[in-house]
Image (cartoon, grey):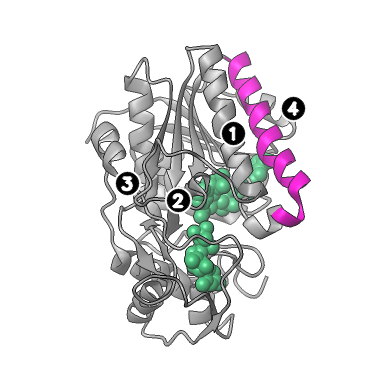
C-alpha cells in the first residue's frame, strides 16, 4: 500500500461533475476531503455514490457540507471544522448561454463566491489553491495548439468570470507571495468513471455536445443539432480537445502535489487537455460505436461565438506536473455510454 497521506483538502463544488471524480481520486490517494456545495447543479446522491466507490475505510475521510460560497457564514462553518492544507475550487456556474442572459447571477456567484473564499482562506491561513479555469480564456485562438502564455480573451460573461478570476488570483499572489496558486485550464471534459456510477448529469437541456449526444442515445432527445458544417476543417464541423474526466481528476492530484512540493510556484497556469483535436462528427461516430445506437443529426447554422478549432499544448503540464492524459475518444465514449445506459435519467430514477 502507498504511504498514507493525511493532508486535508477543501473541495468547493465537490458534488458536481468534475468534483465528484476528483474527490474519489483524492480519497484513493489518502487525502482527507471536505466538500462544500450548494447543490445548485448537483445532488447529494452523487456524493453518496463517491463514498460507495471509495469504500468504507476511505469514505470515512470524506465530509460533506451543504453551503453557498456567497454566504460567508457557510464558509466560516466549514473552515472551523478542519485545518485545510489546500483548496480545490470547482464551485461555479458554467453555462455560456445562461451567462449572457443572467450576467449578474454569474458575476455574483463566480466572482463574489471566489472573493469570499480567498477572504476565508486568508483568515485561516490556508494559502494554496487549485482553481478551475477553462480553455475559454483563449477566446478565438489565432494559433493552435493553445499555449499557456498566449494572450487571453473572453467571449461572454462566463468566460469573463474565468478570466477575471485568473487575474484576481495573480494579483492576490503578487500581493502576498505566501500564496501558491495553480490555474488549471480545462479543455472539454467528457466521459465518466469506469464503474458507470458517477457521471455528468446536467439539469435541463444540455448545452454541451457530449451530454446532448448521450441524451439522444438514451432516447431523451430526438436528434443532435450540429452547429455548423461549413468550418474550414476536415469534415466542416468544429474541432475541440475532449478529455476524459478521470484524466482531469488525476491532473488535480498532480497539481496538488506540485503545490505542496514547490515553494516558489507563485500563480501558474496549466492546460489540461489531450493535445488532440476531434470534430463534432468524430465524437458522434465514437459514441455510435460505443453505444451501438444511431445518433440522428441535423446540420444547423454555427453557434454564435464558437471557435473553429481549439486544442491544448500539453507540454507544460507534462513537463512540470508529470501529468499526461491517458484516454482517447474510444474510452471517453465507452465510459460515458456505460454511465448513460446504467443511469438514463442521471442520478434520478426517472424523469426528474
Ligand atoms: P458542475 O456544475 O457539475 O459542478 C459545479 C458545482 O459547484 C455544482 O455542484 C454546484 O452545485 C456547485 N456550486 C455552484 N455555485 C456554488 C456556490 N456559490 N456555492 C457552492 N457551490 C456552488 O460543473 P463542473 O463541470 O464540475 O465544473 C466545475 C468547474 O470547472 C466550474 O468552475 C466550471 O466553470 C469549470 N469548467 C468546467 C468545464 C466543463 O465543461 N465541465 C470546462 C472548463 C471549466
Ligand atoms: N455542439 C453541437 N451541438 C450541440 C452542442 C455543441 O454541434 O448541441 C458543438 C459546438 O458548436 C462545438 C462543440 O460541439 O463546436 C463543443 O461544444 P461544447 O458546448 O460542448 O463545448 P465548447 O463550445 O465550450 O468547446
- In this rendering, which labeled residue sits more in front, label 1 or label 3? 3
SS label for mark 2: loop
Q: Can I make out residue 47 in this image?
A: no
Sort mark 4 into few (<14), some (14-19) or many (20+) by Cα contacts within 10 Å.
some
Q: Which residue is mark 3?
A: 313
Q: Magenta stretch: dominant SS?
A: helix
Specify the quadrant of the image occupied by residue 280.
bottom left
Residue 102 lies in magenta, yes or no? yes
* Front of the two marks 1 and 2: 2
2 vs 3, front mark: 2
Disc 1 to disc 2: CB gap under 8 Å: no
Give SS at disc 1: helix
Residue 303 included in the magenta stretch of the image? no
- Measure the alpha-carbon separation of dots 1 and 3: 22 Å
Residue wearing tag 1: 165
Screen quadrant of the N terminus: top left
Which residue: 63% across, 41% down?
161
Q: Which stretch is magenta?
A: 100-124
- First in sequence, mark 4 or 3: give its number: 4
Distance, label 2 to label 3, CA atoms, is: 12 Å
Amino acid at each position: 500500500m502507498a504511504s498514507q497521506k493525511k493532508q486535508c483538502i477543501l473541495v468547493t463544488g465537490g458534488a458536481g461533475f468534475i468534483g465528484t471524480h476528483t474527490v474519489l481520486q483524492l480519497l484513493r490517494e489518502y487525502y482527507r476531503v471536505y466538500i462544500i456545495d450548494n447543490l445548485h447543479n448537483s445532488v447529494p446522491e452523487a456524493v453518496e455514490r463517491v463514498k460507495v466507490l471509495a469504500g468504507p475505510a476511505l469514505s470515512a475521510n470524506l465530509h460533506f457540507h451543504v453551503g453557498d460560497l456567497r454566504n460567508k457564514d457557510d464558509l466560516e462553518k466549514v473552515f472551523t471544522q478542519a485545518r485545510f492544507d489546500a483548496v480545490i475550487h470547482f464551485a461555479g456556474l458554467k453555462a455560456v448561454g445562461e451567462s449572457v442572459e443572467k450576467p449578474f447571477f454569474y458575476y455574483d456567484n463566480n466572482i463574489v463566491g471566489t472573493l469570499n473564499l480567498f477572504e476565508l482562506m486568508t483568515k485561516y491561513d490556508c494559502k494554496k489553491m487549485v482553481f478551475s479555469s477553462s480553455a475559454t480564456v483563449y477566446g478565438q485562438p489565432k494559433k493552435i495548439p493553445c499555449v499557456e502564455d498566449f494572450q487571453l480573451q473572453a467571449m461572454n460573461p462566463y468566460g469573463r468570470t474565468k478570466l477575471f478570476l485568473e487575474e484576481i488570483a495573480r494579483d492576490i499572489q503578487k500581493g502576498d507571495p505566501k500564496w501558491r496558486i495553480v490555474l488549471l485550464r480545462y479543455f472539454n471534459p467528457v466521459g465518466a468513471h469506469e464503474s458507470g456510477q458517477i457521471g455528468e448529469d446536467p439539469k435541463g437541456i444540455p448545452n454541451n455536445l457530449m451530454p446532448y449526444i448521450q441524451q439522444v442515445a438514451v432516447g431523451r432527445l430526438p436528434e443532435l443539432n450540429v452547429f455548423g458544417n461549413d468550418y474550414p476543417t476536415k469534415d466542416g464541423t468544429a474541432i475541440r480537445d475532449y478529455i476524459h474526466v478521470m484524466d482531469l481528476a488525476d491532473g488535480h492530484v498532480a497539481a496538488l502535489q506540485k503545490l505542496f512540493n514547490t515553494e516558489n510556484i507563485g500563480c501558474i497556469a496549466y492546460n489540461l487537455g489531450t493535445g488532440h483535436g476531434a470534430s463534432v462528427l468524430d465524437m458522434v461516430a465514437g459514441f455510435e460505436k460505443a453505444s451501438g445506437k444511431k445518433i440522428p443529426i441535423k446540420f444547423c447554422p454555427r453557434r454564435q461565438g464558437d471557435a473553429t478549432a481549439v486544442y491544448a499544448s500539453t507540454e507544460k503540464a507534462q513537463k512540470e506536473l508529470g501529468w499526461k492524459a491517458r484516454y482517447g475518444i474510444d474510452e471517453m465514449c465507452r465510459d460515458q455510454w456505460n454511465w448513460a445506459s446504467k443511469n438514463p435519467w442521471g442520478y434520478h430514477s426517472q424523469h426528474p
